[in-house]
Image: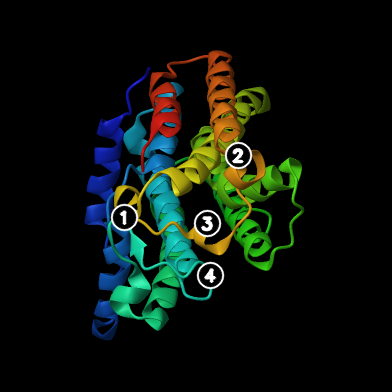
């Protein structure tokens, strides 16, 4: 089993702690609310994936910190909005009150909006690279976030506009969860101007990793306590379609093992040092929260 690259997580955490969102004096409370959620901790899987992918190609992970941080800002915004009463109505996230509980629903909405805008601002202002490559990477990230990605997947989830079979479930989560995970892998490659055949190899890995992440998430939603998860068990509470509800717990575990094996097999096709990516895959498969 590979080990999770905690030194990359520490790089991300250090970079995020140094970020500020300047405005006028009257918006200091909004900055505080944004940082409340952004600095709540966690394994930082998505930005770490970005840095680990960069390292696998021989690049210095530090050179990709602005892009990695932008990805984490977007992920944090999505969590804030997912937790809102109109969405999943959760009151616990990473072991403490969700943002709308701590600061109010109005501030939580604005904090999410602010994090998304600041992510784009950070990417454009700080990420170095050939301009056309940086734009291509930003386009990939925006597409993964929008109607053809995370937001579209969330819409399908909350409106119930989904079939009840395995194909529909995979399609939902390829949008809601998988697209941002895939973008986390593809963004550093696009910044480096990687050729299409190299992108395709990494994309196969990233797509399988997104499936693995969601299956394990669904398993944990029914096998772990809220204290262990550090968040509310909202899928079970809302009766959502999940890998466990469709396949049952044991088959879901088998599917997770298959996805993990597929992700590892995809990594074997990649030229370069993929040990960090292997460690992330192993962590996602065995995580307990």
Position above or below: 205 against 82: above
Q: CA distance from mark 2 to mark 3?
A: 14 Å
Which quadrant holds the N terminus? top left
Residue at the spot of label 1: 94
Of badges 2 and 3, nearer the viewer stands 2
- Under tag 3, what secondary structure? helix
Closer-to-camera residue (19/256): 256
Marks 1 and 4 close (CB-CB < 8 Å): no
Q: CA distance from mark 3 to mark 4?
A: 11 Å
Of badges 2 and 4, nearer the viewer stands 2
> Which label number is shown at residue 68?
none
- Mark 3 vs 4, N-terminal side: 4
- Under tag 4, what secondary structure? loop
- Residue 284 seen in the figure: yes
Snapshot quadrant of residue 54: top left
User: Badge 4: few (under 14), some or many (20 or more) residues near its Cα, within 10 Å?
Assistant: few
- Under tag 1, what secondary structure? loop
Could you tell me which residue is drawn at 33 percent across and 75 percent down?
101
- Mark 2 vs 3, N-terminal side: 3
Q: CA distance from mark 2 to mark 4?
A: 25 Å
Residue at the spot of label 4: 87
Q: CA distance from mark 1 to mark 2?
A: 27 Å
Q: Position of residue 272 (x, y in %)?
A: 47, 15
Position above or below: 190 against 92: above
Of badges 3 and 1, nearer the viewer stands 3
> Which label number is shown at residue 235?
3
Marks 1 and 2 close (CB-CB < 8 Å): no
- Mark 1 vs 4, N-terminal side: 4
Position above or below: 26 against 243: below
Residue at the spot of label 2: 248
Could you tell me which residue is drawn at 27 percent across and 32 percent down?
6
User: Badge 3: few (under 14), some or many (20 or more) residues near its Cα, within 10 Å?
Assistant: some
């Amino acid at each position: 089993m590979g080990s999770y690259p905690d030194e990359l997580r520490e790089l991300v955490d250090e970079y995020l702690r140094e970020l500020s969102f300047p405005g006028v004096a009257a918006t200091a409370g909004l900055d505080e609310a944004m940082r409340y959620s952004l600095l709540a901790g966690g394994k930082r899987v998505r930005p770490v994936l970005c840095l680990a992918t960069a390292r696998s190609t021989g690049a210095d992970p530090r050179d990709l910190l602005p892009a990695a941080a932008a990805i984490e800002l977007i992920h944090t915004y999505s969590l804030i909005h997912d937790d809102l009463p109109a969405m999943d109505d959760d009151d616990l996230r990473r072991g403490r009150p969700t943002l709308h509980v701590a600061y109010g629903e109005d501030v939580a909405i604005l904090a999410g909006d602010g994090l998304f805008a600041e992510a784009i601002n950070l990417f454009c202002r700080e990420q170095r690279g050939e301009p056309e490559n940086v734009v291509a990477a930003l386009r990939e990230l925006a597409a993964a976030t929008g109607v053809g990605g995370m937001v579209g997947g969330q819409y399908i989830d909350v409106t119930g506009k989904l079939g009840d079979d395995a194909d529909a479930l995979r399609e939902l989560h390829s949008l809601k969860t998988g697209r941002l995970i895939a973008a986390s892998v593809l963004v550093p490659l696009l910044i480096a101007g990687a050729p299409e055949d190299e992108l395709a190899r990494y994309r196969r890995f990233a797509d399988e990793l997104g499936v693995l992440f969601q299956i394990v998430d669904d398993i944990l939603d029914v096998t772990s306590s809220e204290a262990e998860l550090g968040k509310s068990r909202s899928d079970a509470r809302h009766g959502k379609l999940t890998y466990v509800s469709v396949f049952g717990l044991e088959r879901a575990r088998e599917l997770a093992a298959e996805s993990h094996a597929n992700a590892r097999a995809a990594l074997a096709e990649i030229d370069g040092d993929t040990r960090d990516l292997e460690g992330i895959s192993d962590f996602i498969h065995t995580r307990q929260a």
